[in-house]
Amino acid sequence: MKADKRVLTTGEVAKICSVAPRTVSKWFDQGHLRGYRIPGSKDRRIPLDQLVRFMRLHNIPLNGLDQEELHVVILDNDVAFSEILANALQENGGYGVTVTTCAFEAGAVVRETKPQAVIIDVSLLDVDAKKISRFIRSQGELKAIKIIGIAEHLDQGRGQALLQVGFDAYLSKPFDMQSLLRLLESGAAVY
């Protein structure tokens, strides 16, 4: 596989994982392996970072797979909290982290880095959760990004509203770092 290839077919994933292509399709269809479908066809595409995440989660040997650092973007204007969160993600999860303080900057960073996940403080004044989700989900190369909403005192009603507009998960601040790491590593929307 070429080192610069960022999106893989189910056949390519099957070869890397030493399984049948149908097994990869099953993983995808059950939500265990994140990716997207080619519009107008049944073909599936799996971003490289999602494959690496899946392989790590299921202890599948990377077999020389040229892996890139998994990346997370944090959008939060609480600088102290963001630094603590970024350090914990780097030390405990091996993630590359970019911290932004405004939605415009976060959008530019997301387009540039194509992270595994975006963690957004949905209580910020310039954050429109529905618009952010719609933007990410409308971009073919960004569709597989996990979107996690965070805020102080984020109750289940507000959290469910985030899920309704396309977020994958939510957490109420303060939260346990292990809860966040589980969200980042799982294919499911756990909150």
Image (cartoon, helix red, strand yellow):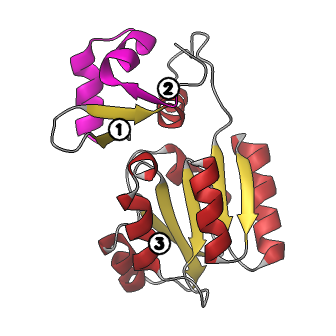
Name the amino acid type tagged 3: Ile
Please state which of residues 131 and 18 is positioned toward the viewer in this rendering: 131
Which residue is identified by label 3?
A: 132
Q: Earlier in the sequence, mark 1 or mark 3?
A: 1
Q: Does the magenta portion include 34?
A: no
175 left or right of 131? right
Q: Which mark is residue 55?
A: 2
Residue 30, image x and y in percent?
25, 39
Q: Does the magenta portion include 7?
A: yes
**SS at badge 2:** helix
**SS at badge 1:** loop
Residue 69 in the image: above or below residue 114? above
Residue 77, image x and y in percent?
73, 80
Q: Which mark is residue 32?
A: 1
Q: Earlier in the sequence, mark 3 or mark 2?
A: 2
Q: Main secondary structure of the magenta part?
A: helix
Name the amino acid type tagged 1: His
26 left or right of 66? left
Q: Earlier in the sequence, mark 1 or mark 2?
A: 1
Where are the magenta residues, as a range?
6-32
- Residue at the extreme bottom: 125
Residue 69 in the image: above or below residue 88? above
